[in-house]
Amino acid sequence: MVPLTIENRLFYRSADTVIEDYPRLAPMRNATSGSVALIATRPKQVYGGEGELVLERRMMRPAKKSFLTEEAFERSNWEPVNTTTFRALWDAEVAELPDTETRQLHLLTGLILPIWTEIPGDNTRIYRVQPEEGPALLGRALDETQASVLRGKFMDLDAATPTDMLRIVLDTDRAVELGNGFSLKRRRVAGHQRLELTGVSKDSLPWLKSLGCFTEIHQYQLRVFVPAEPEDQALRVLTAIQSGHTVDEPGVIAAE
């Protein structure tokens, strides 16, 4: 995989255009931030990630479109505003937005037909890339997550670094061996995605808790988890477990 840095030109709708394109959304201004948006006047019922019914409103901002749950909308300070004020504030926000964005991609090149069905993502298009230096390249483009998933499928786990191991666990269904009998795997526990640590003895439990691991009891069984967020904390814990060290301060690993 060849890492690529891609710079794309960004385009934004003017206030007149967005009002014309979304006539059913109402101009609103956030009394706290001063930002403006077009927001649906009524919420719609949708199914959430756990199959539950959720009320949400469609929202258009200068740089993105999204959905706002009714609960979040009621807690926020969005209020109706007249179109003249909306136009002025919207266009002022657009004027402050960047003209370009930089993305990090990976181009999968070489003999890829034997692993074609293993490549993540729905985009099967073949791209031709001409770097600033060197010959042109042909291959499939992957984003950071897709590249991590593919590396996880074929990586030699014995040679994996703590960073590699974390990406494998977060982005695939594979378990990784951390050494000293510890194993880490992403599992769904009580409706939440967790990083579960197995191979834990009673003697090692206090040390693991000092690193930031936590425990929960499920079906009368004590289970140990590595914090999944923020990722830098999870990485510090994995590094400490692999090396047998303790974590004193964020970003600092000290030998016991």
Image (cartoon, rainbow, N blue to C red):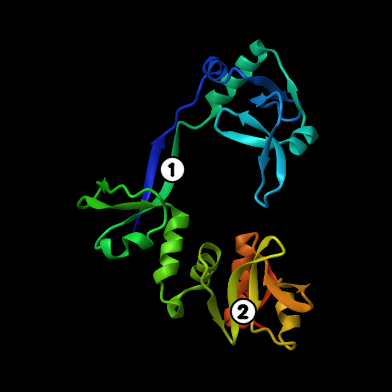
- Identity of the amino acid at label 1? Thr
Residue at image location 52% in from the left, 68% down from the top: 173
User: Looking at the image, which is closer to me, 26 or 135?
Assistant: 26
Q: Is residue 53 above or below residue 34?
A: below
Label 1, on which residue?
102
Q: Residues within 10 Å of mark 1 (few under 14, many from 20)?
A: few
The quadrant where residue 192 appears? bottom right
Considering the image in quadrants, where does the C terminus appear? bottom right
Q: Nearer the viewer, residue 158 or 195?
A: 195
Circle 2 sits on which residue? 241
Query: Would residue 209 be found to the left or right of residue 106 on screen?
Result: right
Q: Residue 56: percent from the left, percent from the top? A: 69, 35
Q: Could you tell me residue 166's position as x and y percent? A: 54, 68
Query: Where is residue 52 drawn, in percent x and y?
Result: 71, 47
| Residue at the image point whose x is 64% and y is 63% from the top | 228
Label 1: state its secondary structure.
strand
Quarter residue 152 falls in = bottom left
The one of 95 and 163 positioned closer to us in this rendering: 163
* Res. 220 mark: none
Residue 164, position as x, y percentages in the image: 48, 69
Alpha-carbon neighbours of circle 2 within 10 Å: few (<14), some, or many (≥20)?
Answer: many
What whole-number distance in Å separates the C-alpha atoms at marks 2 and 1?
35 Å
Residue at figure coordinates x 51%, y 71% from the top left: 174
Where the N terminus falls, by quadrant? bottom left
The residue type indicated by label 2 comes to Ile
Q: Secondary structure at mark 2?
A: helix
Which sits earlier in the primary sequence, circle 2 or circle 1? 1
Tell me if 40 is positioned left or right of 119 in this view. Answer: right
